[in-house]
Image (cartoon, grey):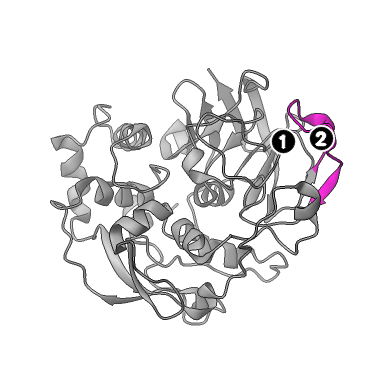
Amino acid sequence: MKLGMVFAAGLMLSACNAGFGDNTAEERASAGKEAGADSALAGLAFETVQGDTSTPATLPVLRTQVLLDRLGFSPGVIDGKEGQSFTLALKGFQRANDLKETGILDDATRKVLEQWRSEPAVMSVKIPAEFANGPFIPDFPKDEAAQAKLPSLAYRKLMEALAERFHTDQETLVALNGPTAKVGAGQVIRVPAIPNAKVDAPPSDERGWSGTLARLGVPSTQPEGEKIVVDKSEGVLRVLGEDDRLIAQFPATMGSTHDPLPIGNWKVLGVSRNPEFRYNPDLFWDADKDDKKTMLPPGPNGPVGVVWIDLSKPHYGIHGTSAPESIGRAESHGCVRLTNWDAARVAQMVRPNTPVVFQE
């Protein structure tokens, strides 16, 4: 097993079996238009420098993905494509709004989304210097022993960081800006319209979680979940509020033939934000025979991404990933993997003892 690699669809991803040292919908859709002026995170705010000519008619799928993401019904990677994750996000939004669950952008769904008709599909922004400064690790090592010597498991390059900040992938950024577009401090680029997140820095923030939220475009204030349901058959994680009403949904990868999802009732024990990862090859059936136990530093390109939500089932949790494009297309070691931005959002919605149901 080699952590930190970009795996092709269908391959096993390393993640689990290791130890670790109410807003309204409208408010959630528009939350965080500007970073707080009194916040030390202002240097991570992207300035909108001009309008954009795109309209719902020219980018209907991408714009709908943006709206669904901001409303808490994540399509995973925003790419303008009508894939499985887009269908699931639409079905989740439809269920939450008492609509027929067609999984398509039908007239009834368009009518509900019409209240956000002024929201754009994409926007042009100036890259702030603090964001562009990284740090980055261009020559990201594949070997765990080499990774353990790094100060953090940071992004490889600015384009990767930008893709995660705007909940998309590098391919989509290239499509929006052209193959010759340059990125760097002060450069203007076109991105999916995920606004600056309103992040309230806590009194104590040793691990820099508020900065992580800002770099992922995830507001620190989220609706409180009363229960988490992980649905194996549909490949989603649902957050339920009072009276078991669906308030958020995220595409997820869970389990494999070797490490099936442990069906049953569990609970959240705690949340580790920007966690280190204690790699123990004895717990992985596909580990290299020469692998040694080691502690990997925190970072978005770590095996569990930016967050680990620890569950009462030993060695199992809900966490992020270094390969967001793999969600729903690859296997895990039994745990529940989300994109880093979705995992960060879920981490703000749960607390110790939140019930977690794993179901077929």
Q: Residue, x 67% and y 37% (percent of image)?
A: 14
Q: Is residue 194 left or right of residue 243?
A: left
The residue identified by callout 2 is: 281
Q: Amino acid at mark 1?
A: Met
Where's residue 284, x and y in %?
76, 30
**Magenta-colored span:** 279-295
Q: Amino acid at mark 2?
A: Pro
Q: Is residue 323 visible?
A: yes
Q: Main secondary structure of the magenta part?
A: loop
CB atoms of marks 1 and 2 within 8 Å: yes
Viewer-proximal residue, 106 or 150? Answer: 150
Q: Tell me the residue at 21%/68% (across/down).
A: 52
**Vertical comparison of 161 with 105: above or below:** below
Q: Estimate how packed mark 1 is, as few (under 14), some (14 to 19) or many (20 or more) residues with alpha carbons within 10 Å.
A: some
Q: CA distance from mark 1 to mark 2?
A: 8 Å
Name which of mark 1 and mark 2 comes first in the sequence: 1
Q: Is residue 303 left or right of residue 59?
A: right
Q: Within the magenta stretch, is there residue 28?
A: no
The answer to whether residue 24 is seen in the rendering is: no
Q: Nearer the viewer, residue 252 or 14?
A: 14
Residue picked out by circle 1: 1
Whole-percent x and y of residue 85? 38, 35
The picture quadrant where one finds residue 102 is top left
Rendered location of residue 140, percent (x, y): 65, 56
